[in-house]
Image (tube, rainbow, N blue to C red):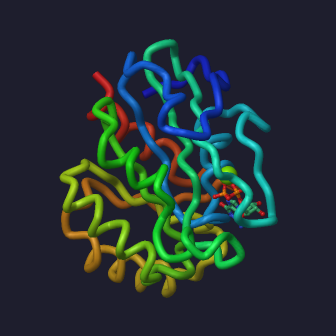
């Protein structure tokens, strides 16, 4: 898939404000600070399209980006950050969970996993949840530039063992652009 146009569409803070299900959606899910916003900016080639931050736990909104006029990229709230409220520490947040359960126009879920920490329980729970909900999902291993060859191989084996139904696993670096071509090629299977 080639991205020729990417614009911020809107932010939503509750299920009641969701836009109509007009377009197929690729939704981005992962722990807070895993590199979701950076991935969105890298994929679209638009710097600053999604706000990045080194302070985790900030994004509690659903952000919609319109891609090529006929697709949404959807940035869902991050999970797993200890300094948010107790309720959200325990789960992924009601908004995130309900969205994955109920939104019919989801074409693909991208689950981002920090390649340096491939076995975190919150990520493994999310994989199990996606499999239970029968959502097609692929795993993006982020911050690949921080890994040695040996760590990369070990991380890949770990994620493969936790996510038997993942459609694909892609190593990605938003800093170098590694994995971008491969990931965009994967999108073609889910967006026509
Ligand atoms: N080394 C490295 N750092 C990254 C990469 N992607 C994101 N980061 C850093 O990780 C932090 C969180 O990134 P952000 O995209 O805001 O994460 P989000 O909370 O998941 O949206 C920022 O300091 C980014 O610069 C990457 O591919 N490589
Ligand atoms: Mg973000």
- In front here: 104 or 189? 104
- In front here: 141 or 135? 135
Q: In which quarter of the image is the C terminus?
A: top left
Is 71 drawn above or below residue 115 in the view shown?
A: above
Q: Residue at the location (42% across, 19% down)? A: 20
**How many marks are shown on the rendered structure?**
0
Is 22 drawn above or below residue 169 in the view shown?
A: above
Q: Where is residue 77 in the image (x, y as percent from the top left)?
A: 57, 52
Is 54 drawn above or below residue 24 in the view shown?
A: below
- In front here: 128 or 40? 128
Q: Position of residue 164 (x, y in %)?
A: 20, 69
Q: Where is residue 157 in the image (x, y as percent from the top left)?
A: 33, 81
Which residue is outermost to the top?
69
Q: Quadrant of the N terminus?
A: top left
Q: Residue at the location (44% across, 15% down)? A: 70
Q: Residue at the location (42% across, 51% down)? A: 110
On screen, residue 70 versus residue 149, left or right, reads left
Is 26 drawn above or below residue 68 in the view shown?
A: below
Q: Residue 131's quadrant in the figure?
A: bottom left
On screen, residue 162 versus residue 22, left or right, reads left
Q: Position of residue 177 (x, y in %)?
A: 62, 49
Q: Residue 49's quadrant in the figure?
A: top right
- In front here: 151 or 5? 5
Q: Residue at the location (34% across, 36% down)? A: 103
């Amino acid at each position: 898939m080639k991205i020729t146009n990417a614009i911020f569409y809107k932010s939503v803070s509750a299920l009641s404000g969701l836009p109509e299900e007009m377009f197929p959606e690729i939704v981005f899910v992962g722990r807070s600070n895993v590199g979701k916003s950076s991935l969105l900016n890298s994929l679209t080639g638009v710097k600053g399209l999604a706000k990045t931050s080194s302070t985790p736990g900030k994004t509690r909104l659903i952000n919609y980006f319109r891609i090529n006029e006929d697709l949404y990229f959807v940035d869902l709230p991050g999970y797993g950050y200890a300094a948010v409220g107790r309720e959200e520490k325990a789960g992924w947040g009601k908004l995130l969970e309900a969205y994955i359960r109920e939104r019919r126009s989801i074409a693909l879920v991208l689950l981002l996993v920090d390649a340096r920490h491939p076995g975190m329980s919150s990520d493994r729970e999310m994989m199990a949840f996606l499999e239970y909900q029968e959502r097609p999902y692929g795993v993006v291993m982020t911050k690949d530039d921080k890994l040695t060859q040996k760590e990369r191989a070990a991380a890949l084996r770990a994620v493969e063992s936790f996510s038997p139904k993942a459609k694909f696993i892609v190593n990605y670096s938003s800093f170098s652009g590694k994995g971008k071509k491969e990931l965009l090629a994967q999108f073609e299977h889910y967006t026509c």
